[in-house]
Image (cartoon, grey):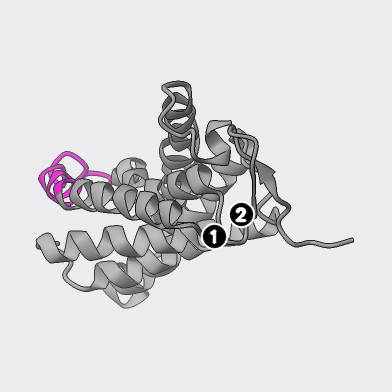
């Protein structure tokens, strides 16, 4: 049995291959990524401004980290193409860096890790499952990518951090990834499909 992505009928009656990117796919993922890049840039300052609020328990701040993971879920749900999660996160991170991210060029590595985390999940489902459960798992995958990047760089053991810090941080990342990026991304794409703006994509069928 072949494991390659199967063709999908478009609303117009044609058939497109999930493995082949069209110009419209590239453009739409880029637009989604650029829009979220601006959101990232703004969210960086929101995050910094909220530091005093979470000063007593820093791990709780990661409950709002899912915003940075949304392109890794939304872009693949829209275009249903291999590589969309990585593409969207890297472009969004690049826009954030160009606008002046407080974390500098490290956001590019962060975007790669987060996009790769979600991409692996969609790949495990052979790019054939796009429902709410897979979106939620992809959000969790992106959160794992975030954890693998953020913890060694920003919270190394040499800084005095221990499991009492790491465990709640990872839990908060996973909750935010699942709820904000996964569930939120799923319902956002569904709303766009109902509005008729995704007619050129399998997600709009």
Residue at image x 27%, y 62%? 93
* Residue plotted at (40% across, 65% down): 162
Q: Secondary structure under badge 1?
A: helix
Evaluate if marks 2 and 1 touch, with contact meaning CB atoms under 8 Å apart.
Answer: yes
Magenta residues, as a range?
42-57
List the residue tagged with mark 1: 119
What label does residue 122 carry, if any? 2
> Based on the displayed image, in which of its 4 quarters is residue 136 positioned?
top right
In depth, the one of 81 and 163 nearer the eye is: 81
Q: Is residue 39 left or right of residue 156?
A: left
Query: Looking at the rendered structure, which numbered label has been put on residue 17?
Result: none
Q: Which residue sits furthest front?
A: 13
Q: Is residue 150 magenta?
A: no
Query: In the rendered view, would you say 5 is above or below 179?
Result: below
33 versus 186 height, above or below: below
- The percent position of residue 122, horizontal first and vertical second, equals 61, 54
Check residue 48 for magenta coloring: yes
Where is the C terminus found, in terms of image quarters?
top right
Classed neighbour count for the residue bearing mark 2: other residues with Cα under 10 Å, few (<14), some (14–19), many (≥20): many
């Amino acid at each position: 049995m072949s494991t390659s992505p199967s063709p999908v009928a478009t609303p117009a009656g044609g058939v497109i291959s999930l493995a082949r990117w069209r110009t419209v796919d590239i453009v739409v993922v880029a637009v989604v990524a650029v829009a979220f890049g601006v959101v990232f840039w703004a969210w960086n300052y929101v995050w910094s401004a909220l530091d005093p609020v979470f000063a007593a328990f820093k791990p709780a701040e990661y409950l709002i980290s899912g915003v940075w993971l949304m392109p890794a879920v939304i872009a693949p749900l829209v275009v249903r193409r291999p590589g969309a999660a990585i593409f969207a996160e890297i472009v969004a991170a690049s826009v954030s860096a160009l606008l002046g991210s407080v974390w500098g060029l490290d956001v590019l590595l962060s975007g790669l890790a987060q996009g790769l985390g979600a991409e692996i999940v969609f790949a495990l489902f052979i790019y054939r499952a796009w429902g709410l459960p897979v979106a939620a798992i992809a959000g969790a995958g992106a959160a794992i990518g975030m954890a693998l990047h953020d913890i060694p760089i920003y919270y190394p053991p040499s800084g005095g951090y221990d499991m009492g810090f790491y465990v709640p941080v990872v839990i908060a990342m996973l909750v935010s990834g699942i709820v904000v990026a996964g569930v939120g991304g799923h319902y956002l794409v569904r709303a766009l499909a109902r509005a008729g703006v995704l007619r050129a994509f399998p997600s709009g069928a």
